[in-house]
Image (cartoon, helix red, strand yellow):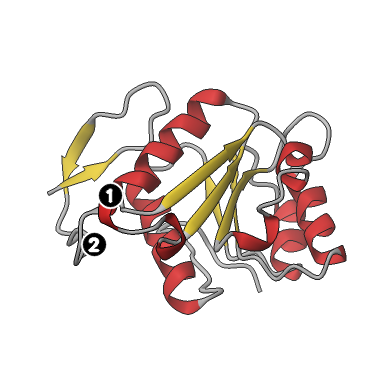
């Protein structure tokens, strides 16, 4: 087994890992798409979108990518997703504004934020509004996998990667 390094420019498997792969009863091709958790990825950086999509699909989950919060909201799948992974800093509507828009629509979608700017003000606001997790770039693929699996197992499992203090 290998730990996946979340490097948008290389999808190579880099480090050994003890994690077990997800168990599958049937081949993916034999199951309808609706049988898999659907994960939406919203990021203006195409490399991040593609790397995250590849990682999520490698777990056997369905993934849809969007280059903006506005494109995601207009997509028609908002109520169908099991988890949203979104960047914070994006042109137009940012990740926090997207969270606010979902709350205004009555959506209780678990959201995992990814950010290169881990300001305490942002983290407090995101958590106060129910963020399921916050990952600070750069992070390895296993951190995203652990957070996502926690969300899917617990509905709104709160993930906090090692080395990152939890906010009260």
Between discs 2 and 1, the one toward the N terminus: 2
Q: Quadrant of residue 114?
A: top right
Residue 86: horizontal and vertical position, in percent? 62, 46
Which element is circle 1 on?
helix
Residue 127: horizontal and vertical position, in percent? 69, 66
Could you tell me which quadrant the C terminus lies in? bottom right
Q: Residues within 10 Å of mark 2 (few under 14, many from 20)?
A: few
Residue lying farthest to the bottom in this orientation: 154
Give the foreground label among 2 and 1: 1
Badge number at residue 29: 1
> Is residue 9 placed above or below 57 in the rendered structure?
above
Q: Residues within 10 Å of mark 1 (few under 14, many from 20)?
A: few
Residue lying farthest to the right in this orientation: 104
Work out whether residue 98 or residue 114 is closer to the camera in this orientation and state it.
Answer: 98
Work out whether residue 143 or residue 23 is closer to the camera in this orientation and state it.
Answer: 23
Q: Residue at x 83, y 32 (%)?
A: 92
Residue under numbered circle 2: 22
Which element is circle 2 on?
loop
Badge number at residue 9: none
Residue lying farthest to the top in this orientation: 9
Q: Quadrant of residue 117?
A: top right
Q: Residue at x 21, y 55 (%)?
A: 27
Residue 44: horizontal and vertical position, in percent? 65, 29
């Amino acid at each position: 087994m290998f730990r996946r390094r979340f490097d948008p420019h290389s999808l190579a498997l880099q480090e050994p890992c003890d994690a077990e792969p997800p168990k599958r009863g049937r081949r993916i091709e034999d199951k309808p798409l609706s049988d898999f958790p659907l994960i939406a990825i919203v990021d203006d950086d195409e490399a991040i979108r593609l790397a995250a999509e590849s990682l999520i699909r490698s777990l056997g989950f369905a993934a849809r990518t969007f280059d903006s919060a506005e494109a995601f909201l207009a997509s028609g799948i908002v109520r169908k997703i099991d988890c949203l992974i979104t960047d914070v800093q994006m042109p137009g509507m940012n990740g926090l504004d997207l969270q606010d828009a979902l709350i205004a629509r009555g959506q209780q979608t678990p959201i995992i934020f990814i950010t290169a700017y881990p300001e305490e003000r942002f983290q407090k606001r995101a958590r106060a509004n129910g963020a399921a997790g916050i990952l600070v770039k750069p992070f390895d693929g296993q951190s995203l996998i652990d957070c996502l699996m926690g969300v899917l197992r617990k509905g709104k499992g709160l993930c906090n990667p090692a080395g990152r203090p939890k906010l009260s």
